[in-house]
Amino acid sequence: MVQGTIIKGIAGFYYVEADQTIYECKARGKFRKDNIVPLIGDNVLITLGTEENSGDKYQVAVIEEILDRKNSLIRPPVANIDQAIVVFSVTYPEIHLDLLDRFLITIEKENITPYIVLNKIDDGKEEDYHNVVETYTQVGYEVLCLSAKKAINIELLKAKLKDRTTVFAGPSGVGKSTLLNTIEKGLSLETGEMSHKIKRGKHTTRHVELIPLSMGGFVLDTPGFTSLQLEGIDKDDLRYYFREFKIYEGLCKFNGCSHTHEPGCAVKQALETGKVLKPRYDSYITYYNQLQDIRRW
């Protein structure tokens, strides 16, 4: 068997790169039986076929085994990621902080390093996004403000990507594909125009694909979406995914404090002094209640 990495999946076929050759693969039926879905980024073992497929473009093979994952995401469905670039626009579509927080929770759960990118700064004024930068910097995230169209601060982002496997995520229309085209000349990913009627971007990325960078590393351009469910998260674990809460772990009066109603809660005391920001705490309470309702249901 040969070891390779799934770089793309389309219509039930998985394209595996191994030894600088790309193989068109089907997965063994045992994966479906065991309810295991191969993900882009998976390291796999394949057996090679004896003939090329009808298109004569790829050699055929079969995925026999999926090796252990260091992490995985459900949306976007990818595995073995080093870091995530969460991209939003400072103008249209407007920054959706609820969606941003949901992205960050999902990423934190998998111990993936997140960066926040605010694109299209050439279209807006600094006051349009200053509060976002200030809030999430205080929380502990690195926020990069740039313009893909004008190539402003692109080098700051490129430095983050070198020799890393990075997933780009965010709503449609924020410029993820344009960013990647600017970073990697000759990539020519399809980009979409903003629909000014509904103030949303048009979906351009149709599938998830692992793309090699000439400077080293890989990126995944993912389809944009405007909602994100907190899948696979228990309400009792939610507090671990708000990084500003971590320094107060163990300081509350009660072990296992949920930071919602208990007396002597260190997080709520930090909220009163402004060390924990109210918008982020309000988001936490909203998600906690939602997850509690799901458990009850």
Image: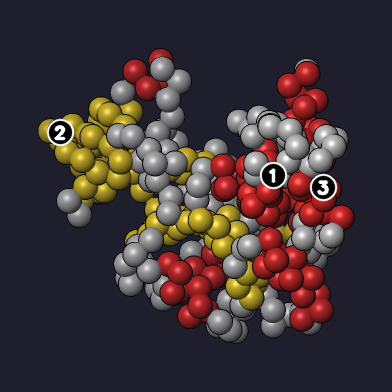
Q: Along the polypeptide, which appears first: circle 1 or circle 2?
A: 2
Kind of residue at badge 1: Leu
Instruction: Please give the residue where the numbered disc 2 appears in the rendered image.
Output: 1
Q: Secondary structure at mark 2?
A: loop
Instruction: Please give the residue where the numbered disc 1 appears in the rendered image.
Output: 251
Residue at 77%, 75% (x, y): give it: 130
Kind of residue at badge 2: Met
The answer to whether residue 143 of the structure is visible from this angle is: yes
Crowd tier of the residue under label 1, counting other residues whose Cα lies within 10 Å: few below 14, some 14–19, many 20 or above? few
Res 268 label: 3
Question: Quarter of the image holding residue 231?
Answer: top right
The answer to whether residue 198 of the structure is visible from this angle is: no
Q: Quadrant of the N terminus?
A: top left
Crowd tier of the residue under label 3, counting other residues whose Cα lies within 10 Å: few below 14, some 14–19, many 20 or above? many
Left or right of residue 238: residue 160: left
Q: Secondary structure at mark 3?
A: helix
Kindly indicate whether the residue at mark 3 contacts the one at mark 1 (C-beta within 8 angstroms). no
Question: Quarter of the image holding residue 148?
Answer: bottom right
